[in-house]
Amino acid sequence: MISLTSCLLASLICIPLASLIHFNRFRGKRFLVSLIQTFYSVPTVAVGLFVFVFISRAGPLGGLGILFTPAAIVVGQVILITPILLGLTISALNSVDRTILDTARSLGASGLQMAVLVIKEARFAVMAAVIMGFGRAISEVGISLMIGGNIRGFTRVITTAISLETSKGELELSIALGIILIFIALMVNFVLNRIQQR
Amino acid sequence: MPLIEVVDLHQKYGERDILKNINLRVDRGEAFALIGPTGAGKTTLLRLIDLLDLPTSGSIYFDGIDVTGLRRMRLEVRRRMAFVLQKPVVFNTSVYSNIAYGLRWRGARESSIREKVSNILELVDLLAYKNRNARTLSGGEAQRVAIGRAIVSEPEVLLLDEPTANLDPISTSKIEELIANIIHRYDTTIIMATHDMSQGQRLANRIGVLINGEILQTGVQRDIFSFPRNREVAEFVGVENIIDGVIVSSQDKIVTIDIGGGVIEAISDYAIGEEVCACVRPEDITLALSTVSSSARNSFIGEITRVVSLGPLSRIEIDCGFPLIVLVTRRSAEELNLARTKKVYATFKATGVHIIRRGK
């Protein structure tokens, strides 16, 4: 659930932002895109640490009191997968034929209408970006552990549970949880694929 | 007042001049063809007229208003036009939705969209494909979707860029029929670019010849095809015999041109001593095996050097001391038994010769 929320939130931020970056020409655009691509492989613990510093009691956002809550994990995961979603969406939009843009413009599309059309045309690749983002969110441990706190029944997610049970020596439980995790990922991908084929 | 007027338009890409000094007026309801070889700048000019690009200098007037620099008005003006690009791209959705796009973007009501799109589907003969994904259509069908999508919003100006490029002959004639239908049925002003001069002849009532970024001549078909203004236009519109010479005598507008090894008589106002080219269309020359007495003033004997069959016509190359190219029907080529090394008489009238002054 947490990963789904993160993925959804990140998509809501990234798809419009990606179109904004894609459709506007500005200085340093290429640099920005390569910066985004660099952050594809940012370590989860680094994001965890970064968010921890911000939302811990003494941090600038400490007043929110969200450390060790599911909300904190969502924030962390959104930050984690934003580069992937943003970068892959931008390249998805890039892959749309330029003549599609010219055609749309010549048919009287405004800037916004054109952006919507291009996202629709690139929908398969955009969906692939979302699936990638979800995959990274559901598989990470570092953030959930560091800023979720792995509190039983509250912020304990499957990955943190696996890590805990394994260190306790409960291998059977860990393996079972692992299988469940793979199964969930499979289900989500299956659903997204169905949407894609529509 | 012309609907579209282009004044002193220049377009540069880097150091290269794509368009030079373009002046053009197209009236409401006119079908104007821009003909010229590939790479002459036809697409660039259409894109500028549709306000897709900004010109380096010059102005474009739409309905009397200079719309070149007005950023805010561009969308509004563009919505009164439609442009079918050379490469027909369809959006990855149904044929119906493809055609409906322009109307949706203009905020039309769903009921009126349904009605208009159905009418257009009928016009472009794709009613049966309504719900098919447009990506699965053939080239000709996709082009029909593109044209339908453009005209559904009832544009005042329809711009067509090589509407039949890369299509087979049957699809081509279908598209041409459709365009003729649109011209006939709607009050649309049409500007089309084509490298196929006969297509320009078939569809347009006025033609502009664009070569190397310059409009060299505009006029009605007859003017362009029979009286090209200079050598480039003559070559492009299919005048295959362009013979250099000097006017040596002139009497009652009948001039004699010395072409070095013979003389050609023609009708012209040019004075004695003028350096000219004599243009003779290959289809205006008749061939015979013996001298025939006729009113035609120019007759040359020559030896056939090559015979090429062009389907219903045959193209005969003759050496009369100067090369001459003649088009005859395949039937008469067979009757006269035309073949290499055979001697023939080539005859053409003085009125069949068009004179162009050289040097310019």
Image (spheres, helix red, strand yellow):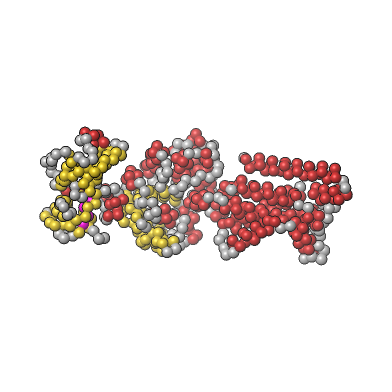
Residue B279 is a magenta residue: yes
Assign the C terminus of chain B to one quadrant of the image.
bottom left
Q: Where, quadrant-wise, is the N terminus of chain B in this rendering?
A: bottom left
Q: Residue furthest front?
A: B341
Measured along the vertical axis of the image, is residue B40 above or below residue A185?
below
Q: Is residue A6 left or right of residue B176?
A: right
Residue occupying the point 75% across, 56% down? A44
Q: What stretch is highlighted in magenta?
A: B276-280
Residue under the image location 71 percent in, 49 percent down: A134
- Taking depth in this image into account, of B148 and A134 the one nearest to the observer is A134
Judged left or right of residue B353, residue A134 is right
Give the total number of marks visible in the rendering: 0
Q: Which of B38 and A168 is in front in this view?
A: A168
Estimate the x, y position of residue B154 in percent, counting from the top left: 45, 46
Magenta region's main secondary structure? strand
Q: Where is residue A145 in the image (x, y as percent from the top left)?
A: 81, 55
Coordinates of residue B125 in the picture (x, y in percent): 45, 36
Classify residue B170 as left or right of residue A112: left
Residue A16 is inside the magenta segment: no
Evaluate whether residue B100 shows in this view.
Answer: no
Q: Nearer the viewer, residue B329 or B219?
A: B329
Residue at 79%, 44% in the rendered image: A178
Residue found 12% across the figure and 54% down from its top: B252
Q: Where is residue B130 in the image (x, y as percent from the top left)?
A: 52, 37
Q: Quick check: can you spot residue A95?
A: yes
